[in-house]
Image (cartoon, helix red, strand yellow):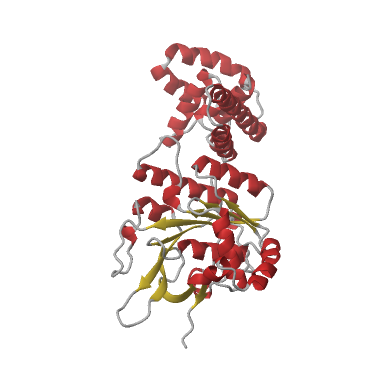
Amino acid sequence: MFNNDELELSALSSAMFDKDCVNKLLDLTKDDFYNNDNKKVYDVIETIKADNEEVGLVSVYTELSKKHTKFAERFMKKQLDYTACYSYNMDYYIKEIRRLANRRQIYIDLDDATKDLKSGEEIEKIIDDIETKTKELDYLGTKYKTLADSGIDKNNISMEGQYYTTGLGSFDFNCRGLYPGNVIVIAARPKEGKTTLAMNIAQHISLKKDVLFFSLEMTVNELYYRILAHESEVEMNDILTKKHCDKVEKTIPIIEEKYKRLKIYDDIDKLHLIKSEARKQARKGKLGLIVIDYLQLVTVKGEERLREKTVIMTRQFKNLAKELKVPIIELSQFARNDEKEWPKLRWLKESGSIENDADIILFLHTEKKEGSSDKMWLMVAAGRNVKRGANRIYLHEGKFRFEDYVEG
């Protein structure tokens, strides 16, 4: 099923009789061939080419004879029937061989999915597996891009307009905002404002783009009250004690309309479910940001160890950001809680994989000094094409609003 021996033999023959076809043949892999005999011949051609020797009928026959004497003789007789194949059709042969290989793989994946379904596996996990495997098929045959293929707008070399501003001037200045495909980690001690900062950014971007906010710690109702306090400029305690009722009530329909593109999930904590929902929403178009609050609360099926789980999550979230071409913000907690010290990269829980897969790492830090008010800092701890350092910012705690600090 889904194979054509004539196509495979024609491609192999073209490579042996036309040296210009050899590299085209090697754009395929051995597994793209269905016939095991043809796989042996492909292996031999690949070996000859790797040794910088000329690929031809004689050299292939000689190499085959070293390991498969009888097969080499049988192959030679069979190959003579294809000496009249047309090498100018090589592109067609390659395309069709790859197409059939993809179909075979999809058939195998669907058969595996059927077995999983019968065994009681979660439907969402099955869908995620199929989507991941299908996405891998998209890359078959993609070998490289030249600089001319990069897609960079030569008339806008600064990339202005290709990244999203966050609404926080110090971050946008140091990091140039959020760039599609990037992973941004925001780390801090517990109760220091990670969720507030991420939600402020999410609110800003949701004015123009869809935002998916996966809240693994707080409920949508808790976040609703925070946004209400932020937008009405009435502190949370006053809202709960029914002060300024008129102002708050007038704000409710405003925030529900203003942030209608902010989609909050408080009942999804599994990695495969987050990926599946993100892909589903991305297919609708205009997805601008994904927020994971927070990384250590995400569960990975079959993996309980924090180190291994973190490696899987950070790599898969990075791949998802590149696949969907959206930035992903991951919140993370520190492994230690020394308030007197400025945070360090090694404080990140399982910092190795987080640092490797993140494009930008930010720290929130509250500087506490006796006899003076606390100072909050946003630190750019690591990143590509960023200005590292710390900028002072201000948090209106009761109103859940971060702002750039202004002296005086």
Count of numbered badges drawn on the protein: 0
Q: Position of residue 311 (x, y in %)?
A: 39, 46
Q: Residue at x 55, y 44 (%)?
A: 275
Farthest bottom residue in view: 408
Would residue 201 be visible to someone looking at this image? no
Q: Is 259 on the left or on the right of 381, as rendered?
A: right
Image x and y of residue 83, in percent: 61, 22
Horizontal placement of 335 versus 298: left or right? left
Of the pair 247 and 139, the residue shown nearer to us: 247
- In x, y percent, where is residue 169? 53, 75
| Residue under the image location 51 percent in, 18 percent down | 37
Closer to us: 29 or 407: 407
Query: Compared with residue 115, is residue 237 higher up or lower down, i.e. above or below?
Result: below
> In the figure, 397 relative to 353: above or below?
below
Where is the N terminus found, in terms of image quarters? top right
**What residue is rendered at 57% in x and 15% in y?**
78
Left or right relative to 197: residue 88? right
| Whether residue 112 is situated above or below residue 139 in the rendered picture | above
